[in-house]
Image: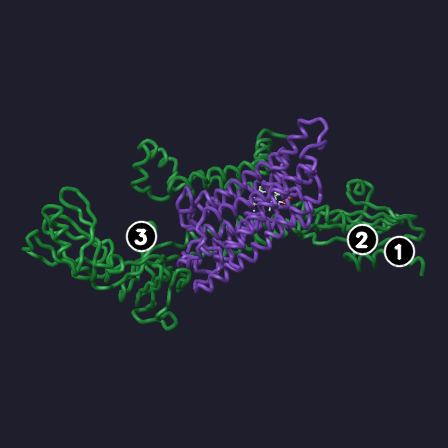
Chain colours: A purple, B green
């Protein structure tokens, strides 16, 4: 069994999970929701083993390092963290439908990595040879994943809230029947960001600590650093929106979506469109 | 007695205490920061200026877009944020402090109305006797209660983690501490750069603002080396450095290994491996197309020299063995760049073992000169980033406070339980500052236990 075979299996599991979630939305049979969730769990397990195996394979090749060193490995890890955060949320709050809005993100990541990227294990360049790489990348990506989940929930919130405004008898039928009430969605959104915000903060701090250790400056306004701060400002605004009159509800949901868009730009856009110190280039 | 002046001050104060201002500042900072990630920061490179019109370049310069994170308007936003933070805290802290230091210890009818969790348990017992049992129960199952008696009615009050209400202020304070740390760094620290050739030593470095700074000691490069992976990708850049005081090596700082991600610190100044190059001499001979008038030419490191025909030349890359790039060739080779007097620039490779190739190249370009490579003297230099930042510890203190504060603000909650015991009934009320759902569960479990506890004692 090789890691790349298991990664393919993971991709299929996420695809199946997403499709069953969609059928579940339409058919409203709770057994389908459970099946979709179990498929996602199975994918998560396969992916966990695959990541561990890839780690080991790198040591077998004599260039041992945690599998977090290039774009392929980071996209795979991002996918993994999204499903992990979603699984934790599901275990705690049991709102299955959220999966229909979260699994597409995980699938997108895996499909892009498996179909569009070189998955060769490469040795680490000197700039990345540090334990800080692990702390920094793990905290950042767990934070990003929580924001992805929050974004999915916010989309549900906006759909449901829009529907309640226009339809006389809200929650009467259709796909929205399965959605939790908007009050619950709003709360779940906050809880996901409550997980993501401290992790992003830790991610920025470990990044600053690493930069200080490796270059002697904890902050140099390089585009990646600046974008992570932009993301941080947006979610800080989200947190204060909840206690500011006129900013609760829809506007907070939009802030969460904008925050995730900024997160994705910080992660991918900066490398593809801007230049800087960080080396996860797509080139 | 509201004078206009007072009104003005009052509205200014309200303005700075407003959370709408906070939203405005946070979103503005997010949007404005984008500018500096799109426009290159620092002295603008020629290629960039060529892309945009001079008017645009002038406007960008006037607006401070080339150094926007230090422009007055960006700094002003940060100051506004700080004032907003401090004003909000001054306004809210006294109230929060009162909740912590002078808790409401009695369950009045008004308070009871405002609580989300209230239960009444009927009881036939005397309030004075039952209060002991309830107090013992709370102490064992929740937290030691305070007991008050008003007109024969007994009030019990127990709470958990009241101080966590301060955690938000800890987060806000941490932001100000980080600002202070970064200001100390920019006032009393420096960032600089230095190149040291192998065997050479330096005692001055060049700051980012092009000032020479005296270190107060010297640093010698003993050796620089570079390792590669079999694929040719770089594996390690290594400088061996020795610190010298008055020309003598300092014992613990002799032959220190410095690699990327592993710097050397001495007397608060830290040296980071950053770049490298060849500082040694390259040797060439230059002649006319016919091979006559041959003269030796020596080029030191990255320097540029003038050739007899008026062109200037410098070395961009060199190798001891060209066969790793072109298998059918052998010996040393150098890539040189030639700027001819008529303004042309050409870049080509000259060889030590293949003079015929060098001559051929010159012929193809008409009039020469013919350049032959004679090899190089290997002498590497290392490029070090130099930094001193006395504010960095304060910044880390701020970061630690921020992480602790955010954790406490999100995951801890001030939970309060009131019990009122009067003739015939026990009323229990509860409230939590955060995560009401989880508290409701705790509350219900607690009330159930209290009921069984009271029933049990009645039977015995
Ligand atoms: C102009 C700047 C700011 C002002 C005036 C401000 C003000 C406030 C206020 C009044 C609260 C509510 C406190 C309460 O519930 O009693 C709050 C909460 C909070 N603030 Fe700020 N804040 C500012 C900036 C920031 C920033 C930059 C951060 C970034 C970490 C931050 C993090 C928080 C957190 C984590 C909470 C708790 C939110 C929650 O419990 O959901 N604040 N802030």
In this rendering, is residue B316 above or below B111? below
The circle on residue B211 is 3
Instruction: Give the residue pinned by disc 1.
Output: B454
x and y percentages locating residue B312 in the rendered image? 16, 49
Whether residue B434 is visible here, answered yes or no, is no
- In primary-sequence order, the first of circles 3 and 2 is 3
Question: Helix, strand or loop at disc 1?
Answer: helix
Instruction: Give the residue pinned by disc 2.
Output: B446
> Is residue B349 rendered to the left or right of residue B146?
left
B259 vs B214, nearest the viewer: B259
In this rendering, is residue B132 above or below B108? below
Which image quadrant shows ligand 1?
top right
The reply to whether the C-beta atoms of the residues labelled 1 and 3 are less than 8 Å apart is: no
Instruction: Look at discs 1 and 3 and give the one toward the viewer.
Output: 1
Q: How crowded is the residue under tag 2: few (<14 C-alpha within 10 Å), some, or many (20+)?
A: some
Whole-number angstrom distance, CA of label 2 to CA of label 1 = 12 Å
In this rendering, is residue B242 above or below A264? below
């Amino acid at each position: 069994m090789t890691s790349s075979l298991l990664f393919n299996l993971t991709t299929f599991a996420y695809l199946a999970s997403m499709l069953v979630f969609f059928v579940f939305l339409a058919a409203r049979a709770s057994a389908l929701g459970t099946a979709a969730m179990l498929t996602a769990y199975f994918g998560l397990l396969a992916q966990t083993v695959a990541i561990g195996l890839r780690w080991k394979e790198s040591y077998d090749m004599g260039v041992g390092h945690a599998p977090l060193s290039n774009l392929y490995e980071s996209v795979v890890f991002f996918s993994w963290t999204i499903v992990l955060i979603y699984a934790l949320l599901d275990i705690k709050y049991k709102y299955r439908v959220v999966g229909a809005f979260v699994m597409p993100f995980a699938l997108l990541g895996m499909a892009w990595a498996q179909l569009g990227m070189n998955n060769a294990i490469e040795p680490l360049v000197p700039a990345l040879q540090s334990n800080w790489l692990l702390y920094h990348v793990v905290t950042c990506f767990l934070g990003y994943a929580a924001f992805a989940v929050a974004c999915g929930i916010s989309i549900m919130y906006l759909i449901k809230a829009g529907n309640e405004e226009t339809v006389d008898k809200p929650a009467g039928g259709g796909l929205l029947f399965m959605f939790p009430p908007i009050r619950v969605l709003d709360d779940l959104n906050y809880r996901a960001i409550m997980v993501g915000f401290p992790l992003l903060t830790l991610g920025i701090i470990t990044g600053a600590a690493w930069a200080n250790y490796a270059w002697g400056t904890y902050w140099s306004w390089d585009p990646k650093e600046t974008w992570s701060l932009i993301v941080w400002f947006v979610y800080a605004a989200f947190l204060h929106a909840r206690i500011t009159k006129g900013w609760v509800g829809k506007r907070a949901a939009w802030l969460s979506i904008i925050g995730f868009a900024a997160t994705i730009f910080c992660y991918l856009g900066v490398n593809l469109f801007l230049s800087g110190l960080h080396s996860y280039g797509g080139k | 007695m509201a004078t206009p002046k007072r009104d003005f001050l009052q509205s200014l104060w309200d303005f700075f205490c407003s959370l709408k201002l906070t939203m405005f500042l946070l979103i503005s900072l997010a949007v404005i920061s984008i500018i500096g990630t799109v426009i290159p920061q620092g002295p603008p490179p020629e290629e960039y200026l060529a892309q945009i019109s001079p008017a645009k370049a002038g406007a960008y310069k006037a607006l401070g877009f080339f150094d926007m994170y230090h422009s007055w308007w960006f700094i002003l936003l940060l100051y506004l944020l700080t004032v907003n933070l401090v004003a909000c805290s001054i306004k809210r802290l006294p109230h929060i402090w009162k909740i912590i230091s002078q808790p409401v210890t009695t369950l009045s009818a008004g308070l009871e109305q405002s609580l989300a969790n209230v239960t009444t348990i009927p009881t036939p017992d005397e309030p004075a006797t039952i209060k002991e049992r309830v107090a013992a129960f709370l102490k064992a199952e929740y937290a030691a209660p305070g007991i008050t008696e008003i007109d024969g009615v007994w009030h019990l009050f127990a709470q958990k983690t009241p101080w966590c209400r301060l955690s938000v202020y800890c987060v806000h304070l941490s932001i100000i501490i980080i600002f202070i740390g970064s200001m100390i760094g920019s006032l009393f620290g420096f960032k600089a750069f230095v190149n040291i050739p192998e065997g050479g030593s330096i005692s001055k470095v060049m700051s980012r603002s092009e000032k020479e700074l005296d270190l107060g000691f010297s640093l010698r490069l003993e050796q620089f080396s570079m390792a590669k992976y079999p694929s040719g990708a770089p594996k390690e850049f290594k400088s061996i450095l020795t610190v010298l005081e008055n020309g003598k090596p300092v014992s613990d700082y002799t032959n220190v290994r410095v690699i990327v991600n592993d710097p050397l610190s001495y007397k608060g100044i830290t040296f980071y491996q950053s770049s490298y190059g060849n500082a040694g001499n390259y040797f060439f001979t230059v002649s006319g197309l016919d091979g006559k008038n041959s003269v030796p030419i020596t080029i030191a490191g990255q320097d540029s020299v003038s050739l007899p025909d008026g062109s200037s030349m410098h070395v961009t890359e060199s190798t001891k063995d060209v066969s790793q790039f072109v298998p059918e060739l052998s010996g040393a080779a150098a890539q040189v760049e030639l700027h001819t007097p008529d303004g042309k620039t050409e870049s080509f490779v000259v060889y030590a073992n293949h003079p015929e190739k060098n001559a051929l190249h010159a012929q193809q370009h008409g009039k020469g000169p013919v350049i032959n490579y004679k090899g190089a003297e290997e002498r590497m230099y290392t490029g070090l980033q130099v930094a001193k930042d006395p504010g960095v510890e304060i910044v880390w203190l701020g970061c630690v406070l921020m992480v602790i504060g955010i954790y406490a603000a999100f995951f801890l909650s001030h939970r309060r339980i009131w019990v009122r015991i009067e003739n015939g009934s026990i009323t229990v009320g509860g409230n939590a500052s955060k995560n009401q759902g989880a508290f409701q569960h705790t509350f219900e479990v607690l009330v159930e236990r209290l009921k069984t506890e009271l029933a049990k004692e009645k039977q015995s």
